[in-house]
Amino acid sequence: MKAPKLPLLVIEDEAAVMSFLRAALERNGYQIIGAASGAEGLKLLEHGTYMGVISDMRTPGGVTGADVHAWIRHHRPELSHRILFITGDTVNQETMTILQNTGAPCIEKPFRVAQLLKSVETLLAGQRNE
Amino acid sequence: MLSLAQGTVDHICSEIEASGQAALYSLSPYPDRALLEDFSFFYGMPIPGTGGRAVLGLLLTSDQRLGSSEESYFQILAGIGTLALRKAEVETDSRTRAEELQEVLAICADAGTMPSRDSFLELLASRSARFLGYRACFVGLVEEGICRMRWTWRDQASSPANVELDSAIIRNLLASRESFWCEQPRRERGLDGAMLLGMDVEQLLAVPLVGSNNECLGILGVLDRIDGQPTSPEDVQRAQALAAYAALTLNSVRVLENSEKHRQRAETLVSLSLELGSFVEMDDLAKKLIRRGMELLEARCGFMALVRGSRCQIVVAEGTESEHGDHNLNNRLNYALSGILRQCLTNVTAVSGEKFDAYLASELGWRQVVLAPLTGNGGEMLAILGLVDSRRHSSFDIELVQAIAAHAAAALQNSQLFARITRSSREWAEIFDSISDFMLLHDEHQRILRLNRSLSSKVDREPPQILGLPVRDLFDLGNNTPACPFCLDLIGQEFREEFRDPKTGSIYLVSSSRLRGGMDDAHQVVHVLKDVTASRRAERLYRELFDNIQEGAYFSTPDGRLIEVNEALVRMLGYDSREELLGVEARDLYVDPQHRELLKRALHQFGRLRNHEIALLRRDGSIIYVLENSFAIRDDAGQVVEYRGVLLDITEIKHVQSQLLREHDFNTQILNHTQSLIAVVDTAGLISYANRRCCQVAAGVDGELVGSRLENIIPKSHRTALREALHSVLEGKAVNHLEIPLARGNEAIGSFSVNLSPMRNAVGEVNSLVAVMTDITDIAMLQAKLMHTEKMAAVGQLVSGVAHEVNNPLTAIMGFADLLLENPELTKEVKDDLQVIIQESQRTREIVQNLLSFARQTPPEKQRVQLNQVLRKTVLLRSYDLGSHGIDVVEEFDSGLPEVTGDAHQLQQVFLNILNNACDAVADSNRRGRIVITTKQASSSAEVIFRDNGTGIANVERIFDPFYTTKEVGKGTGLGLSICYGIIREHNGEITCFNNPDSEGATFCIRLPFTQCARKPLAKAAAAR
């Protein structure tokens, strides 16, 4: 396991899910910085540098996953293809529209650890190729 | 003594005279000898030198005898006596002669002083007789070659006479100019009795009156010496001397008289012409003329007739005493004159009575008629003057008559002219007065000379009050205005053409002309004022109307020239100006020029055209539709000379009309096809309109629906409620949602919602109401459906929320279980337990996924789908199971079923689900299962029907509710049909189910719309799922 230089920003309001994501990813060599809301995530994004972003789509505090994506595309365009959404509500029409518009990858809750890791690797692989 | 015996002495003396010898006569034989006393003898001897007329006589007694000496003495005495006698005679003679001469001169002097010929003749006659010692005297005058006795003197009285002396002796006397005398002239041949005037004439002495130029002027005749002596040569001499002087005097009298005659004639003519000139009436003139003529010719009667063409007409007759009335006489005269007229009558002509008219001659004794033609300037005969039995026919008289006739002709002509002038003047005055226009004549100072009656009555003043006033006074114009308001100058050259009376506001058209005045050269001016106020007003009104009406108006000629158009027409046809439009040929305005020909024919035939619709071309080429109302104007000969018409632009109206028609159609369609019952009810509650549906529904009600009461079509139980509702609607309050049960024709009674709305008339009163009755039986059903739909949507939302909430903990559970499994320190037992956690977590995940699917969270991937194909695949999937369970599946597919648009997999899921349910149902029924799958075409959708003979559905209403299941616990999640419901709804379809009404089992029916060709395939769903 090589040590990546930059951390992953994980935005997830559900504490149980956050702790699972942190455990699963840190055990597989990723550095994680967590944010419990979209607003907090944006604050961290403003002041830090990240390898990628994993965000729940429905987050409290007025800033949703879609908002985070929009902000990144505007202020951190280099990260705009490093966003992985997670959602428990894929068949929601609104969610489907956001996914379609952003073209960002998404994994549905509940998911297996292997599914998560594969998705993160695929997401970051684009960066390494660049 | 001797004087007593005159006869005897005379007799003897005459015997002595005759013998010329002295002789002795015995007196005894003489009867008067007794008077001679005792003388018996008369001795007498003629005294010589006396021509025997003097006898010296001696009376002797019977005894006395003369001796010779006595005889000688007696002879000497006689001789001396003779001398003395001679001397005395000479003396006497010379004295007598001087006296006679004096007498003749006195007579002639007296005669010369006589004022007229007649008085001269009278004097001459009386004085001549006395002077010559005759008892009677006559004077005859030669006139026109004929000698007429003009005056007689007899028995100390004189009288005029008019007897023609036409005997041989007289003629001889006149020719020889020698005196003639005779005794016992009656015995003379060549003297007729007429000249002797019936006198017992003994002696006649006639001497010619010889004028200065040896012309025989006439005869002076004396008759019967007073002394009874025979006419002596002295008498003849004296008579001749008197005659010579008288002739001289007569000559001068004649000359005088001639000149007097001429003077008189001139006077007569002058006075006649003056008299005649003063007569202007034909009758008066004729009377005067006839009287004059009668006087002049001493005629018995006279007449005058006017010549009219070839006929005569008596104007007047004077002095006629007709026993048969004037009328008869007049006719007779007319007849006679007309006959005369045929001969050319140019001069005064005397005609015998017999020749003139036999009847008049015989009946009235007319012997002679003098006819004088009255000839006009051009020689035409105007009239005839007739004088009957005139006593004077001298050429002078005739000439005078001729002259009078000439004057009378002139007077007659004047009279006729005057009559004509009078008539025309009267006519002119009448015309002047009868003209209703105001007429006015004024002089050069613009003072009124004359005005007609209508003007005087207009100013309400009699002409005498106005004449001489300035014209302006008629109109109460101020003094500072010109004297004549119609003249623009004082010389009568420029006139005003129009005048407005400031007092009345009337407008007059003034026509004026300048006339030359009557007496002097001053001009006069005639003004004729025509009151055109009304026509001006009419003209103004007409003009305003013509210019302001919205309709286009035109005048045109039959050959298509526009004479006049109004502004409205110019606007209507889109031209810039009237002038521009007037330059357009009428036929060019028609869309179809043939149309104009049709209009022309109609106008010529019927004279007018009403509400004819035609299409006209506007200037920009666009078409307008107009309604034409026209008529033809004809001249006196009946020829059509003009068309006049009014055009109403109905393009907009036509547009609105067609729109209205469409709307009407639309409304009718709606009214007739709506499922609502719509009726209009009047204030009495009677139906005045009912739509088709209303009629269908009310078909069971007896009688005609329109006109019957609305409440008749509803059940009795609800009539009171309806009546109350109607009542309140008629008060203006609408009533909504009144629920009333109504028999739907032959069907069962349905529930109807009745809405009643008032309709108001123009003044806002409610005069009827509209009842709309909607069948809400179906609506209630739809409402139930809607409620189900809403329920399902709510469940979906709920499920979506729950699923999301469940997913988070499940993620953590499954994730940590995964992570635990990686822990090598865990025993197999623990790992197996973890496997169970993961497995159940997976199951939970699937349940949540299904819930989300139902909650339409998964949009179908739409493509063209052949339902029959999908159904066959589905049946094939289950064929093994079905066969093993002994269930018969019957496919009744419509092979021509069109495609539908949808997700074949989802649809298969639906069909599979239903088929499984059906299998379960028939399996539970313990019967041999039979499932009939039918596809067929409904109107715009495909129908798939699954009919089984299973146990049926316990609760049809809840069958699509999530988690509702009839299956035993663990056999189903209760989400299958809910998901089916969600899928079909996503396909815009419908899924229903019901228990078979006629048999065991239930039926599911799915309807899916056919693919619409125009519809584009939907965008593919997002890849990530």
Image (cartoon, coloured by chain):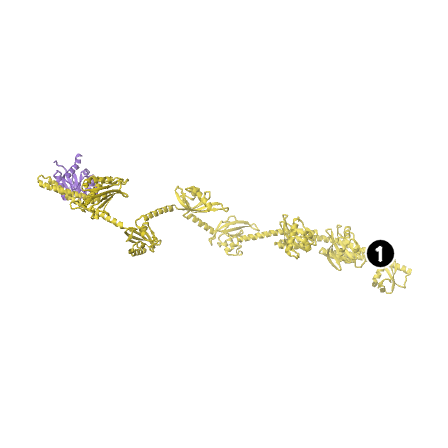
Name the one closer to the observer, B747 or B216. B747
- Name the spot of residue B739 as percent of width and height, x first: 27, 53
In the drawing, does residue B139 fall left or right of residue B824? right
- Name the spot of residue B344 as percent of width and height, x first: 66, 48
Q: Chain of mark 1?
A: B
Residue extending farthest top? A129
Name the one closer to the observer, B561 or B671. B671
- Name the spot of residue B1002 as percent of width and height, x first: 22, 46
Secondary structure under tag 1 reads loop
Q: Residues within 10 Å of mark 1 (few under 14, many from 20)?
A: few
Which residue position holds label 1?
B51
Numbered circles on residues, count: 1
- Name the spot of residue B42 as percent of width and height, x first: 87, 61
In the drawing, does residue B7 fall left or right of residue B733? right
- Residue B76 is at least partly visible in this image: no
Q: Report the quarter where the C terminus of chain A lies.
A: top left
Q: Report the quarter where the N terminus of chain A lies.
A: top left
- Residue B62 is at least partly visible in this image: yes
In the drawing, does residue B505 fall left or right of residue B225? left
Residue B720 lies in what quarter of the image? bottom left
In this rendering, the answer to whether B512 lies above or below B53 is: above
Name the one closer to the observer, B686 or B351. B686
Write down the colour of chain B. Answer: yellow
Residue extending farthest right? B68
Which amino acid type is marked by label 1? Answer: Gly
Write down the colour of chain A. Answer: purple
In this rendering, the answer to whether B226 lies above or below B565 is: below
State the residue at coordinates (71%, 55%): B116
In the drawing, does residue B550 fall left or right of residue B89? left
